[in-house]
Image (cartoon, coloured by chain):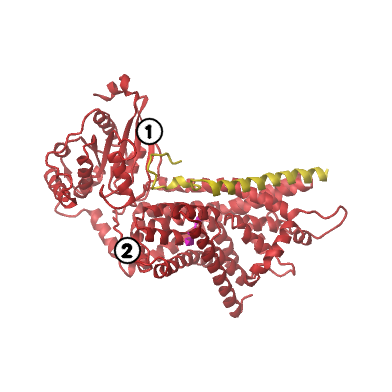
Chain colours: A red, B yellow
């Protein structure tokens, strides 16, 4: 039945459930976006989809298709969680199976992709083969007879280029027709239970009969192999990884300086304007010192966050990140972590919450627990503003600041690895399972994709700044401004703040942090950041605004650098700034992460252990670093 | 006038404090972790991630 007839038919009120299934990195998510007009995250990195996405697609003026984007799998009956999810959808375990399966096949790698296609077709579900990246196959002079392939598989085969939309309309029509048909079984498909080897032989036979492969290698393959000779080399690979990461952080510091200065001047101007126009009093103080002062201390770091995710997205798209995973895998296995831990640990660099959740992909409980327990050591984006502030306080030179910044990431990763190694020798004894990873060809990155990723992260950061951080800024301001001195009594601002509620609380807790060189203000900053790390910068900004010496036009870093102790000595001496920086790298200061650890491990015991060993380690290492710096002659 | 302003800012700060506490309570009792949609691989039923 043609699609127009299908749309007009009264029985078509029922929506067609369509599932996209295929090997990792075959363009399922790109096709999902092309079908549904949704922008899900895509990249040149296998395993981008770690969940089921649901979208809907319009056919004509009516919505007919509910589209499920399944995680990429190499086989339907594998051990991994992705395979179990895909198998549940194919076999209808727990819910009715999809009405139609679109098996996304990489046209440039037909044999391997047909193994999964054979497994899905063996389930006798209506299916359509989307022969994706046909342009890449053409570029490699691979000629596929898709009619012959269709006859061999017993289902429609539609050549497409999901990235450009070529062939997607034909695919829609084929889907609509397949929904109304019963899937015929391919004539020579190995019987159920014949095993993966038989399927692989079958796939090889089909590919050989329906496609021609060039005798010579393509220029793209040659280029990829030449690059990989160095980028995955046991010595050059890690060196290249360190160089790429160093360049990334240096670019981050130098390029972000311009928009940061602009944001600072805007907030400075706004603060001056409000001070000049509003009548003096508590309301003006709340707005200028609490809201504007606090938020400017956080929002000023927006350019760095956007730029970091922009650059990481470019790296993903080129295909380099998969090589980085390959290089890092060797390292992980030596420390008792499985190769599959790379994705959770990488995700934890954005936020530990999704990082810990994506550890569900790790089939072995011991490996999963080890990954969950060390994931929060990875430097998440909430630490970013704190790192920028404290490294800038430590080093005026952007190069040294960038090196210190990269060092924070390295310290967090090293702490995670060493802790994992300790776990694997004590409470979580055992050997991690090996990882199989596909290295995709190098491709030109999509600038648009990178811009959208940066925008998404920026909006998430601004949302956080506009809600919880603003609330904490207001509370912190109030606690630092009250109780007010009696009318007519002239008290210096610094004395008034020390006598405030937050000042009193800071003085009570301060002895705990005295060995690290923290005064009551820094103690308050550290304690409040246990709610969320990024609160530290805004808290310090609010506390700085209360000493009566603040200059609203001065940069946030310059203003915080000028903070003093009760005795008038600078607060952020090199040893104190270094101790604070190390404490923030290693300490567990995130309530949502503790909540998700409890949920994923099923016990508060692991969350409590995480809080204890991370914060304990942070304290000991920060103290040791401060002592060493003082012995070396630093203040 | 100052007393009125004191009362206003104190009310605002109290509201902000309540919102922080409510968020913390919601977090501790929630069955779904915060910001969970980005990747939840074990979701057995189709769901929409925003």
Q: Residue at image x 32%, y 19%?
A: A10
- Between the residue at mark 1 and the residue at mark 2, the CA separation in whole angstroms equals 40 Å
Do discs 1 and 2 share a chain?
yes
Locate residue A299, reporting x and y percent: 59, 51
Q: Residue at image x 12%, y 39%?
A: A187
From the image, which quarter does the N terminus of chain A lie in?
top left
Q: Alpha-carbon neighbours of circle 2 within 10 Å: few (<14), some, or many (≥20)?
A: many
The residue that mark 1 highlights is: A56
Residue A170 sits inside the magenta stretch: no
Residue A59 left/right relative to A300 = left
Checking the image for residue A621, the label placed there is none
Residue A380 sits inside the magenta stretch: yes
* Label 1 secondary element: strand
Locate residue A413, reporting x and y percent: 45, 64
Q: Quadrant of residue A22?
A: top left
Report the span colored magenta: A376-381
The residue that mark 2 highlights is: A231
Say which chain tag 2 marks.
A
Residue A382 left/right relative to A327 = right
């Amino acid at each position: 039945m043609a699609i127009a007839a299908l749309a007009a038919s009264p029985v078509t009120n029922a929506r067609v459930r369509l599932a996209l299934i295929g090997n990792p990195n075959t363009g399922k998510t790109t096709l999902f976006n092309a079908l549904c007009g949704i922008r899900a995250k895509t990249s040149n990195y296998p395993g981008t989809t770690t969940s089921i996405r649901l979208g809907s697609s319009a056919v004509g003026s009516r919505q007919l298709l509910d589209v499920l984007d399944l995680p990429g799998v190499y086989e339907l009956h594998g051990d991994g969680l992705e395979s179990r999810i895909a198998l549940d959808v194919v076999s209808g375990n727990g819910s009715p199976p999809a009405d139609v399966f679109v098996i996304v096949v990489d046209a440039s790698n037909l044999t391997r992709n047909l193994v999964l296609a054979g497994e899905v077709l063996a389930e006798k579900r209506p299916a359509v083969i989307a022969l994706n990246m046909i342009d890449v196959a053409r570029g490699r002079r691979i000629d596929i007879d898709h009619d012959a392939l269709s006859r061999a598989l017993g289902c429609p085969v539609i050549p497409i280029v999901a990235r450009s939309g070529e062939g997607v309309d034909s695919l829609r029509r084929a889907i609509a027709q397949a929904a109304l048909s019963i899937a015929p079984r391919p004539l020579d498909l190995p019987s159920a239970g014949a095993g993966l080897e038989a399927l692989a032989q079958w796939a090889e036979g089909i590919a050989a009969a329906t496609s021609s492969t060039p005798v010579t290698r393509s220029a793209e393959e040659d280029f990829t192999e030449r690059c990989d000779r160095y980028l995955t080399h046991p010595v050059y690979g890690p060196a290249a990884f360190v160089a790429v990461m160093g360049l990334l952080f240096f670019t981050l510091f130098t390029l972000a300086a311009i928009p940061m200065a602009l944001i600072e001047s805007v907030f400075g101007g706004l603060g001056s304007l409000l001070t000049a126009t509003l009548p003096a009093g508590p309301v003006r103080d709340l707005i200028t010192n609490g809201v504007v002062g606090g938020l400017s201390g956080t929002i000023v770091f927006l350019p760095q966050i956007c730029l970091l995710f922009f650059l990481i997205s470019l790296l993903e798209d080129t295909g380099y990140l998969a090589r980085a995973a390959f290089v890092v895998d060797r390292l992980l296995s030596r420390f008792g972590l499985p190769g599959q831990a790379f994705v959770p640990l990488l995700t934890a660099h954005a936020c530990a919450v999704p990082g810990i959740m994506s550890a569900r992909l790790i089939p072995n409980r011991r490996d999963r627990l080890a990954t969950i327990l060390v994931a929060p050591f990875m430097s998440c984006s909430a630490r970013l503003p704190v790192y920028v502030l404290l490294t800038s306080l430590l080093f005026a030179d952007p190069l040294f600041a960038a090196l210190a910044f990269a060092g924070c990431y390295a310290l967090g990763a090293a702490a995670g690895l060493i802790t994992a190694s300790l776990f694997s020798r004590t409470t979580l004894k055992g050997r991690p399972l090996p990882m199989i990873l596909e290295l995709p060809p190098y491709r030109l990155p999509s600038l648009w994709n990178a811009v959208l990723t940066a925008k998404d992260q920026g909006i998430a950061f601004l949302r956080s700044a506009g809600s919880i951080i603003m609330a904490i800024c207001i509370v912190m301001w109030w606690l630092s401004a009250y109780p007010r001195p009696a009318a007519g009594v002239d008290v210096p601002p610094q004395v008034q703040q020390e006598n405030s509620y937050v000042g009193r609380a800071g003085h009570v807790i301060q002895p705990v942090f005295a060995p690290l060189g923290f005064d009551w203000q820094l103690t308050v900053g550290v304690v409040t950041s246990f709610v969320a790390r990024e609160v530290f910068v805004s808290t310090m900004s609010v506390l700085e605004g209360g000493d009566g010496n603040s200059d609203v036009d001065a940069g946030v870093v310059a203003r915080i650098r000028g903070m003093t102790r009760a005795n008038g000595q600078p607060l952020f001496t090199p040893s104190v700034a270094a101790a604070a920086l190390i404490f923030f790298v290693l300490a567990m200061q995130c309530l949502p992460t503790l909540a998700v650890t409890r949920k994923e491990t099923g016990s508060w015991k692991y969350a409590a252990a995480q809080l204890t060993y991370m914060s304990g380690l942070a304290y000991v290492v920060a103290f040791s670093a401060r002592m060493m710096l003082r012995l070396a002659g630093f203040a | 006038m100052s007393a009125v302003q004191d009362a206003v800012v104190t009310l605002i700060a109290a509201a902000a404090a309540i919102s922080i506490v409510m968020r913390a309570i919601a977090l501790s009792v929630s069955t779904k972790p915060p910001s969970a949609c980005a990747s939840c691989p074990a979701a057995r039923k189709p769901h929409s991630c925003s």
